Amino acid sequence: MARSLRMLFVAAGSPATVFALAPLATAARNAGHDVVVAATEDMVPVVVEAGLPGVPATRRTMRAYMFETRDGTPLALPADTATRLRFGGHGFGRLAAGSLQALRALSRDWRPDVVVGGTLSFAAALLAVELGVPYVRHAWDMGEPVEVDHGAAEELAPELARLGLPSLPDPQLWIHICPPSVLAPDAPAGAVMRFVPTGRQRRLEPWMYTATDRPRICVTAGSRVSGEQDVDHLERLVAEVARTDARAEVVIAAPDDVAAALTARRPEVRAGWLPLATVLRTCRALVHAGGGQTALTAMQAGVPQLVVPNMPKLVPHSQRLSAYGAAVTLLPGQDTPEAIAAACHRLVTAPSYTERSRELAAEMAALPGPAEVLASVEELAAA
């Protein structure tokens, strides 16, 4: 390394957007670079918990940007799938516009040599153009539909016009964290980096890293579940998964408040905020809602997956995983109790799913790590 560089990482408004960037940001700090990670105010504690310096890019939450126009008019989620993807893009566009003032102020006091933005952190692209520094676009998970970009470009038309840009800026480098075998065929060319699980951790208990003779199946609805409705959904899912095998042990990864409500109803179930990358290595299958970071963590552990996507944008990568043979995907309407139980039984008893999952794990392990990919970012920033 010729000199220490200033590297600004721009996340967004959910833990997954921070966790995805943390391995490369940590590698940059370990290499001696000056690193700052910007995110929404409510995500700064997540940045800090990951051992990184965090600053707020906006005091509003990502949800507020999604469901309100710039003037505060409430918005409703469209029912149509294609419209919903553009709707999400508009929300991320508003998040970008709302983050620029704080990012500009930061850059006046601490001018970065390179800006690394998460997949939908469009403020990173705009700021890099304003500053005349390289822009790196870093995937959060297995990829996003292009319709989201289109919606963001529509929302950011005033900002793009002020910069004299006809469209969203292209990055000088794309960094993917999805194994090539299940990466979207139309994904932009770029570096492919090994995925490193970086979720919130907790004190380990022996059962978390010890497999038993009983088939263990992990169930999760993601990190943002809350409320009675989510508890009801999880409880039904646990009951359906338990039908797979009378001997099956079901463990649930969920926020502690949701887990407490669930275990009050089902005291035989282990539930809570789990170190997923550790627990999955003792599991025969994972049942989840399609989140990209969750899917990648299961791939890294070599565990077959039952995916029940809860958002349209999660369907394409879930289906690619199923087409590879490492998962079963049940779309809305297909996810009956009988279908869930039958799918779990197939994942646990058919060796091909475990074999294909382990092939993906081996492919992922052979990819360049964050420290190796960092060299490409350093070259851009130092040029």
Image (cartoon, grey):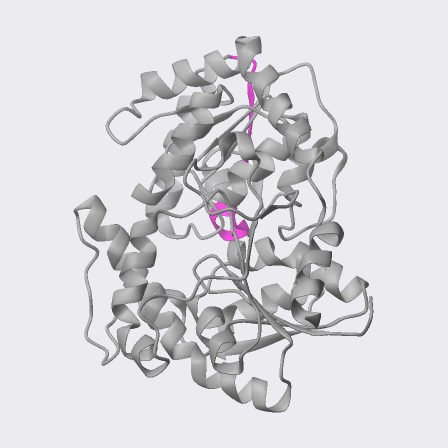
- The answer, for residue 269, to whether it is visible in the render is no
Q: In front: 54, or 97?
A: 97
Where are the magenta residues, as a range? 246-260
> Can you name the residue that lies furthest to the front here?
383
**Which of the 4 image quarters holds residue 209?**
top right
- Quarter of the figure with the C terminus: bottom right
Name the residue at 43% across, 16% down: 243
Callout count:
0
Magenta region includes residue 171:
no
- State the image coordinates of residue 20 (x, y, percent, origin top left): 58, 53
Please name whichever residue, 122 or 205, is drawn nearer the observer in this view of the structure. 122
In the drawing, does residue 108 fall left or right of residue 148?
Answer: right
Q: Residue at x 82, y 66 (%)?
A: 1
Left or right, 85 with reference to 292 = left
Residue drawn at the location 65% of the way across and 58% of the way down: 22
Residue lying farthest to the top in this orientation:
350
Is residue 1 visible to the viewer in this orientation of the structure? yes
Whole-percent x, y for residue 354 in the image: 59, 17
| Residue at screen point 25% across, 58% down | 87
Give the left or right position of residue 208, taking residue 289 as reference.
right
